């Protein structure tokens, strides 16, 4: 019978434990490699996942390379026009733009002057991020349009941004309804440099090289906004009907060699009838002079803007 000693028994225990610890270390090392690889794979995969954009002012579809169009629409309005802005957010936020198109709709006004504006407008910005406050005194025909266009190159000059940040920039009234898909379709075949686009004034005219584009909504290519910032021509002539004055700058500066008359896809609301009005019709880009809710509703009904309303047990709309 073998003699039992605590020392020999301890040796038997230590040797298996040693190999067990080595096995654990090897297993942990292998798992660490797998975990790091998993993280690397995750980072790679997530880098290609588009992030959701909760900014209600921006309509962005999937990019399609050379077909991409970036448009900024600046709606000139007043700080106190809260209900109008909320209404227009619904109008433009429910429109769908085609593939490869980005449309940013911003509300543009001059410096705030009231205490309540500083609170309410700040809340709007926090919620929607779709407001541009220009460094000017509020006006319609004393340089506000110039301040808007000439400020854009500095407002959107981020070093990591696309160049240009927008192919086209537009000024629009807050009583104009713009159909974004139709606007984009009309822009696709047009040049992206030295472009001046809109509804030709006077109303009977169809020649975009004679006079100017109506203030209901006119659009220029990005290079013209840059020119307005740097040129001395607009600074010498700021006052007067803003759309006519803008046309004067273009003519004097010999800009806008590419022009597009969007008449009669852009027009004034049909009532009361004038030489500038047109019946509502499918080939519409913009309708102007929607001065009251009745005119807005008639226009929206004509274009059946609620056709995509999804059925639900939560509501019943005839």
Image (tube, rainbow, N blue to C red):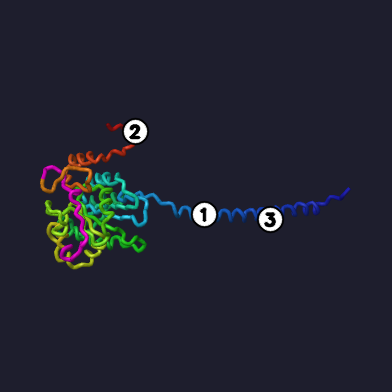
The kind of secondary structure element at disc 1 is helix
Residue 146 placement: quadrant? bottom left
In the image, what residue occupies the spot 62% across and 54% down?
Answer: 28
**Mark 1 Cα-neighbour bin, 10 Å: few <14, some 14–19, many ≥20:** few
- Residue 70 vs 307, above or below: the answer is below
User: How many angstroms separate mark 1 from mark 3 (CA)?
Assistant: 29 Å
Q: Quadrant of the C terminus?
A: top left
**x and y, in percent, of residue 202 in the image:** 12, 54
Residue at 35% x, 49% y: name it: 54
Q: Residue at x 41, y 51 (%)?
A: 50
- Who is closer to the viewer here, 201 or 159? 201
User: Which mark is in front, 1 or 2?
Assistant: 1
Q: CA distance from mark 2 to mark 3?
A: 63 Å
Is residue 51 at all visible to an observer of this figure? yes
Residue that label 3 marks: 22
- In the figure, is residue 11 to the left or right of 318? right
Q: Quadrant of residue 151?
A: bottom left
10 Å crowding of disc 3: few (<14), some (14-19), many (20+): few
Residue under numbered circle 1? 41
> In front of the other: label 2 or label 3?
2
User: Which residue carries the number 2 mark?
Assistant: 314
Which of marks 2 and 1 precedes in the sequence? 1
């Amino acid at each position: 019978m073998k003699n039992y000693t605590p020392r020999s028994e301890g040796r038997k225990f230590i040797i298996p434990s040693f190999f067990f610890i080595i096995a654990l270390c090897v297993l942990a090392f292998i798992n660490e490699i797998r975990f790091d690889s998993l993280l690397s794979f995750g980072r790679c995969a997530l880098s290609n996942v588009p992030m959701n954009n909760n900014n209600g002012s921006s309509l962005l579809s999937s990019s399609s390379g050379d077909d991409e169009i970036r448009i900024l629409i600046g709606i000139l309005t007043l700080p106190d026009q809260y209900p109008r802005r909320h209404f227009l957010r619904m109008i433009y936020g429910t429109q769908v733009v085609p593939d490869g198109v980005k449309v940013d709709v911003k509300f543009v006004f001059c410096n705030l002057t009231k205490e309540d504006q500083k609170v309410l407008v700040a809340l709007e910005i926090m919620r929607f991020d779709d407001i541009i406050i220009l460094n000017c005194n509020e006006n319609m025909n004393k340089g506000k349009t110039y301040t808007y266009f000439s400020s854009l190159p500095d407002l959107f000059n981020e070093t990591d941004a696309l160049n240009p940040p927008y192919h086209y920039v537009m000024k629009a009234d807050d009583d104009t309804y713009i159909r974004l898909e139709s606007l984009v379709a009309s822009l696709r075949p047009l040049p992206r440099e030295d472009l001046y686009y809109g509804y030709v004034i006077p109303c009977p005219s169809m020649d975009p090289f004679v006079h100017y584009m109506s203030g209901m909504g006119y659009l220029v290519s990005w290079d013209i906004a840059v020119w307005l910032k740097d040129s001395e021509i607009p600074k010498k002539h700021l006052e007067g009907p803003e759309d006519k004055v803008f046309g004067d700058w273009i003519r004097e500066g010999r800009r806008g060699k590419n022009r597009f008359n969007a008449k009669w896809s852009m027009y004034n609301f049909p009532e009361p009838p004038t030489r500038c009005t047109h019946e509502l019709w499918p080939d519409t880009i913009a309708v102007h002079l929607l001065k009251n809710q009745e005119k807005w509703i008639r226009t929206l009904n004509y274009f059946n803007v609620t056709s995509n309303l999804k059925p639900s047990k939560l509501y019943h709309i005839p």
